[in-house]
Image (spheres, helix red, strand yellow):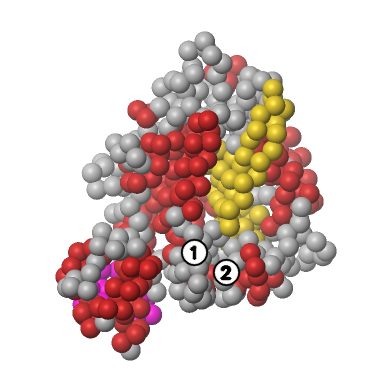
């Protein structure tokens, strides 16, 4: 990321573009996108009980742990410039996460049970750089490609290129942007079941917007940041989406909502719709994971969304689930101060096309920016945990997800499922075992397992899955 400012500001790593340029970009965006995008989105806030359940959706440690060398974050904390073996390794690590979320019932009716999976697109292209032509690949994961609107959460997965002999070849870009990629992976895993439940619910209120996760390649400049030596991946993807058209098809989604959404498209929109016009909002994450960040609001059009992040942080803290139990906590990540100008980053090609942007990047930048010290030691686990919780809550509320696992319909919530759920396990153990083995791969259970055995295994799973599975038993009994 880059901007053009005075040497003093450049030294502080905050490079700003002129207000006039940004104003022209915004006006251009309004001309192309005003008829099909709403600037804000109205949705209800979760009750306190659902806010408290956010941390129980799944354990973020497998994705953000700094001590487990097998965690997703540990596996991608390597030098990873585009078109290198390490870049391919990181790309495969990202793909493997979403492959684990693929449909679990290929021969069953996906509208009733099992995972729906994610639509995966590897957008590959050849970029002309000062270091020669480079093969680059953006990764795009979409829950329901047939939905006429998308909420995008994005980050870049490449690290900055440094030539041999520079002494910087080992640069891993922990905040820039390995950690943000790990936050997005956690978001996908944590909300996967709730997203599936919403897809099966049909095309009701709010279901015309789906979640799309984007990992950009080639964000970093090879030499000096310019309009031609930077943001290769996002520029190419924005161009591609501006030249191709959204064509919803029930075959691209397993859910019954796709055929209902196909007819809805956009209000006040005529003719074919470009892919880029289906983006309702883009949230771009960058330079995150270090302690005590300060995130201002860079654009008035998404000030409301910045406020939603701030509000989510406060409510999670009040519920006692913002920070991990071993953490002392910290100050708010967000600032209400006006950010003068903006920062050049992967969002710019989309901003020019009228996409409303929330840029989640600290000002000033972390003091490890583009230094070898931007490594594992620059990251704070408590801070990363808090970012995961904030993203979970904001996205779950934005998309109006049911994070209670469907148990609310039975008058049960969270840990209160125990009495009725465990009793039904005892009465319908054989069916529970069948569901558990197929849906969750729990081969450790056998026909001799007692309800207590099942509970012991169950409590180590993400709670939402456990509650959802128990709900099936209760429904079967009723």
Q: Is residue 290 above or below residue 304?
A: above
Alpha carbon separation for disc pair 2 and 1: 9 Å
Residue 315: image tag? none
In primary-sequence order, the first of circles 2 and 1 is 1
The reply to whether discs 2 and 1 touch (Cβ–Cβ < 8 Å) is yes
Which SS does the magenta portion mostly show? helix
Percent coordinates x, y for residue 71 in the rendering: 36, 41
Q: Is residue 146 visible?
A: yes
Residue at horizontal 45 percent and vertical 65 percent from the top: 104
In magenta, the rendered stretch is 407-421
Q: Quadrant of the C terminus?
A: bottom left
As drawn, the residue found furthest toward the bottom would be: 478
Secondary structure, mark 2, is loop
Q: Is residue 181 left or right of residue 463?
A: right
Percent coordinates x, y for residue 436 in the rendering: 32, 69
Q: Please give the residue where the numbered disc 2 appears in the rendered image.
A: 254
């Amino acid at each position: 990321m880059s901007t053009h400012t005075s040497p003093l500001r450049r030294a502080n790593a905050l490079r700003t573009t002129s207000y006039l340029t940004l104003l022209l970009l915004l006006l251009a965006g309004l001309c192309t996108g005003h008829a099909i995008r709403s600037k804000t989105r109205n949705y209800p806030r979760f009750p306190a009980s659902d806010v408290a359940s956010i941390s129980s959706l799944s354990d973020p440690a497998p994705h953000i742990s700094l001590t487990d060398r097998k965690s997703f974050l540990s596996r991608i904390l390597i030098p990873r410039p585009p078109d290198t073996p390490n870049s391919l390794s990181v790309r495969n690590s990202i793909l493997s996460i979403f492959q684990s979320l693929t449909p679990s019932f290929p021969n069953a009716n996906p509208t009733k049970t099992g995972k729906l999976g994610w639509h995966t697109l590897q957008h590959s292209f050849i970029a002309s750089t000062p270091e020669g032509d480079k093969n680059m690949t953006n990764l795009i994961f979409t829950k329901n490609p047939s939905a006429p609107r998308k909420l995008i959460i994005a980050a870049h997965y490449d690290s900055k290129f440094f030539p041999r002999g520079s002494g910087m070849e080992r640069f891993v870009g922990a905040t820039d942007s390995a950690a943000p990629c790990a936050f997005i992976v956690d978001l996908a895993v944590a909300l996967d079941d709730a997203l599936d439940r919403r897809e099966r619910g049909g095309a009701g209120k709010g279901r015309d917007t789906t979640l799309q996760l984007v990992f950009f390649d080639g964000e970093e400049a090879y030499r000096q940041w310019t309009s031609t030596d930077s943001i290769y991946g996002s520029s190419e993807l924005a161009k591609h989406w501006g030249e191709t058209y959204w064509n919803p098809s029930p075959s691209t989604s397993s859910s019954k909502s796709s055929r209902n959404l196909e007819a809805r498209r956009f209000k006040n929109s005529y003719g074919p719709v470009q892919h880029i016009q289906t983006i309702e909002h883009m949230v771009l994450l960058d330079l995150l994971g270090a302690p005590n960040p300060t995130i201002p609001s860079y654009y008035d059009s998404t000030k409301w969304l910045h406020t939603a992040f701030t509000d989510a942080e406060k409510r999670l803290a009040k519920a006692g689930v913002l920070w991990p139990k071993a953490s002392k906590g910290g100050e708010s990540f967000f600032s209400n101060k006006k950010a003068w100008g903006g920062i050049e980053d992967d969002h710019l090609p989309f901003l020019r096309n009228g996409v409303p942007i929330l840029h989640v990047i600290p000002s000033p930048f972390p003091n490890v920016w583009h230094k070898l010290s931007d490594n594992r030691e620059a990251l704070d686990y408590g801070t990363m945990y808090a970012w995961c919780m904030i993203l979970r809550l904001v996205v779950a509320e934005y998309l109006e997800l049911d994070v209670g696992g469907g148990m609310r319909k039975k008058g049960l919530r969270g840990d209160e499922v125990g009495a009725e759920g465990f009793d039904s396990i005892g009465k319908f153990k054989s069916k529970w075992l069948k569901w558990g083995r197929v849906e969750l791969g729990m081969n450790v259970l056998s026909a001799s397992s007692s309800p207590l055995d099942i509970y012991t295994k169950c409590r180590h799973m993400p709670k939402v899955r456990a509650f959802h599975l128990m709900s099936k038993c209760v429904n079967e009994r009723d």
